Amino acid sequence: MYMKKKKRWPRDEVLYNKIQETEFIHFFEFVRCISLLMPKKMRNNIICLLIWHKFPSLSARRARSLLLFLQRFKIININIPCFKTLCNYRAEPLMQGVLGNLIEESSKPLKEVEHDFATDSTGIRTKLFSTWYSLRIKKKILKRDHMTSSPH
């Protein structure tokens, strides 16, 4: 049986490497900029949740540990609430919308280079097809150039 070769976008390796290597620098520059624009009352909580949202696999305590690490090395300059407060805010449906919008804003600089590749929350996509597993479980894939956010 002849297997058809997978269709792929040609990838600009230099551009791909630069984006991968500077992802966190740009993200934390964005965090710093929006912290200057936010009302002081919710600034700390939103910044903490935004950073946690960037690393959705972390538990609440580990997310707080990451935030304390970033604070200690002066990457962020905010008061970090206890893990329970972070959990309570993260559970708010309204907060999910805010975080999703902020993550979307942080990805806007990539618009300039999106003609070379598509991006999603896992990084760079070069494949234009659905996987067999996705088809088997009837997973609906609208586009490859979408951004996902964690449900929790």
Image (tube, rainbow, N blue to C red):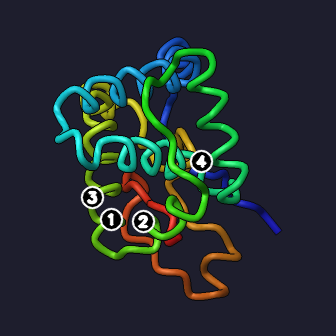
Q: Quadrant of the N terminus?
A: bottom right
Residue at image mark 3: 98
Q: Are marks 1 and 3 in contact (CB under 8 Å)?
A: yes
Give the CA distance from mark 4 to mark 1: 16 Å
- Looking at the rendered image, the disc whose residue lies closer to the viewer, 2 or 3, is 2
Give the CA distance from mark 1 to mark 2: 7 Å
Measuring from the top left, give residue 72's x and y in whole percent. 62, 21
The kind of residue on which mark 2 rests is: Tyr
Q: Are marks 4 and 3 in contact (CB under 8 Å)?
A: no
Residue at image mark 1: 95
Measuring from the top left, give residue 90's x and y in whole percent. 46, 65
Can residue 50 be seen? Answer: yes
The quadrant holding residue 43 is top left
Q: Are marks 1 and 2 in contact (CB under 8 Å)?
A: yes
Residue at image mark 2: 89
User: What is the crowding at mark 2: few (fewer than 14 residues within 10 Å), some, or many (at least 20)?
Assistant: some
Give the mark, 4 or 3, whose residue is nearer the N terminus: 4
Quick one: SS at disc 4? loop
Can residue 8 be seen? Answer: no
